Structure formats: structure tokens, C-alpha cells
Image: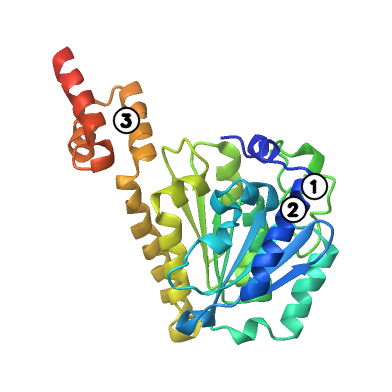
Amino acid sequence: MNIAATMDNWRISDEDAETWLSEIEATAQDTGAFFRISADHAAIFHEGYGAAATSLLITFESMDQACHRPHRLPIGLDLCTADDPSRLVIVAKGRTWFRDAALTTFFTSLHDDQFFSDFERHVFYGAAMGGYGAACYSRYAPDSVVITTEPVATLAPLKAPWEKRFPDQRRRDFNTTDSYAPECAATAASCIILHRDSRAEDVMHASLFNSACQHRLPLRFLRQSAEEHLEGSGALEHIISAALMVCPGDEDLILLKRRIELESLRALRLRRTYEPYLRYLFARLNRDDRAGLLRRLYRHGESVDSVKEFFQRKRQKSEHRE
């Protein structure tokens, strides 16, 4: 899936954006606060409930994509609703890459007012452009956990000359000290980078995240974007929920990093029952004529209710050909 094309397909008009912001503002007033940071950025704060309120989930998202999600809610307000942690959702209108002086001032004010000190745990999340924003702004809450899917490290031509997908955005200033995502996220206790291994640009951006706290998890056999795949399989919510449960002050940072990595790997096993993943895995193995692996997939698929009949038919057809 082409990230740039997807962002274009989901782009909404200024009128639709204002309508959506008004809806979100009305909702936010009941449970927290709403901030119009600039013409291109807004923030929604949701105050959590009970013990989970001491954890803060900060997400960076596209307004265009949020409008096309179920219930027209950004993913930051749609995940982990059972535990109900506190949330700070930053939304951008268009391809801003969260490069906005007003947004930087907003986070500086939060830091200076010790807003982040009110919470025991901080988890930053974003995908693609949002992953870039999450990594860059995580510097305001050192020792946080950063979870990104298909993050872009930078669009600076000298650091990423191979990145050709966003030519109109490369004129933005990506050469300041706070614009190189891997460096900003190096202050995190743990930074998980989930990316497709089938797209060269995603692999190359991920390879730039190479600090000691950063761990890359390549994802194979994806037809969807990494975020769609992980959310659909339930793995994304599991990873974020696990991150919200740990506290950097409770254990050695090296052990904490390893714990987050193991929870992420465990969450990825949820894909074993995710129908789109299993169907695409079958298509790839069948195309490559991997008979031995196909037999193993048939046995597994027939144990998964959602694809049981599909794999029974495929196995019978294969046996008939033999």
C-alpha cells in the first residue's frame, strides 16, 4: 500500500474538517478539554478514570484518516477504552508532518507547566506521518514508551535522499535539532518500530532508528498498512495496553525495554487468527508453490472459525489435483 496515495485518497475538505472538529470539541468538553493549537493542528485531552488515569496515551493522527474511521473518532480515543487511561490526541489537517511552531510552543507549555509530571506512564503512538510526530515529540517526556508503525525518520534530502514519496513536503525544514525522529526518540525508555519488510522505504526509515532503546519489528505478508493490520488483528491494542501498564520507575530501563519487546512479539501472535492475514499468507505461499508450508497452513486454518471453510475447500482442491 502506498502511504502517500492513501493520504491523498483520504484528504477531506476544509468544510468537512471544521464540521469534524466541532463534533470532537463537543465530545471533548464532557470528558476533558479541546485546544485549537493553530489552523492546522488541534488537541483533544481526555481525563482517564480510576487507576488507569495515571497513564497517559499521546497519539499523533491525521484528521483526514480519523474522519474515515468507525464512529469518526481518532484511534487515540478508540483504543484501550476498557481501562480508560488519560489521552492526549494531536490531530493534523493535511500533510503537516507536525512541523508547526505553534505545536512546539504547545508542548513546551505543557512541559513547563509540569503537565507530564502528573502521570506515571507516558506512551506515544503514531503511524507513518503520525509515527514521525510521536517520535519527535516524545522528547518532552523522557523515559516514555514510543510505539510507531511505518514511521518516517526524516524528509531531509541529505539524510534520506532515497525518499521520493513526498516531493511537495521536502521543502519543509527538517534540519533542526528537533526534527530528526530517531534522535528525538532516543530519550525514550523503549521505542518499538513496527514496519513492513516488503517496502524498501519503510525498511530504510526503520533502519535509522538504531539507538539502544529502539527495537525494530519487521512485519511480513501484509496487504494492508501496518496500522490497519495491527488494529484489525487486535495486536495494536494489546501492545499499547501492555505499554500503559509498565512504569519506568519500577524497574531497570534495560529490563523494561526487553519487557515491552516481548509483549509486542506476543501481541503479533494474534495475527494467527486474523482472516486477512491468513488469506494473504495462503496467496503468497500458493504463488511461490510452497507445498510443505501450505499443508501446515491448511491444518492451522481449519482450526480458525473465520477461515475454516476457506481452508477446507483449498485443501480438498489441492488433494484433488495431486
- Which amino acid type is marked by label 2? Thr
Q: Residues within 10 Å of mark 1 (few under 14, many from 20)?
A: few
Q: Nearer the viewer, mark 3 or mark 1?
A: 1
| Helix, strand or loop under label 2 | helix
Q: Where, by quadrant of the figure, is residue 146 drawn? A: bottom right
| Helix, strand or loop under label 3 | helix
In front here: 280 or 17?
Answer: 17
In front here: 22 or 169?
Answer: 22
Residue 91 is left or right of residue 100, and the answer is: left
Q: Nearer the viewer, mark 2 or mark 3?
A: 2
Tag 2 near tag 3, CB within 8 Å: no
Distance CA(mark 2)–CA(mark 1): 6 Å
Q: Kindly identify which residue carries mark 1.
A: 15
In front here: 273 or 262?
Answer: 273
Residue 83 is left or right of residue 293, and the answer is: right
| Helix, strand or loop under label 1 | helix
Q: Position of residue 175 (x, y in %)?
A: 81, 56
Of callouts 3 and 1, which one flags the residue occurring earlier in the amino acid sequence?
Answer: 1
Which circle marks residue 19 in the picture?
2
Task: Tell me the quadrant of the picture where the N terminus can be found.
Answer: top right
* Count of marks overlaid on the render: 3
Task: Tell me the quadrant of the picture where the C terminus can be found.
Answer: top left
Q: Residues within 10 Å of mark 2 (few under 14, many from 20)?
A: few
- Which amino acid type is marked by label 1? Glu
- Which amino acid type is marked by label 3? Phe
Q: What colour-coding does the image apply?
A: rainbow
Q: Residues within 10 Å of mark 3 (few under 14, many from 20)?
A: many
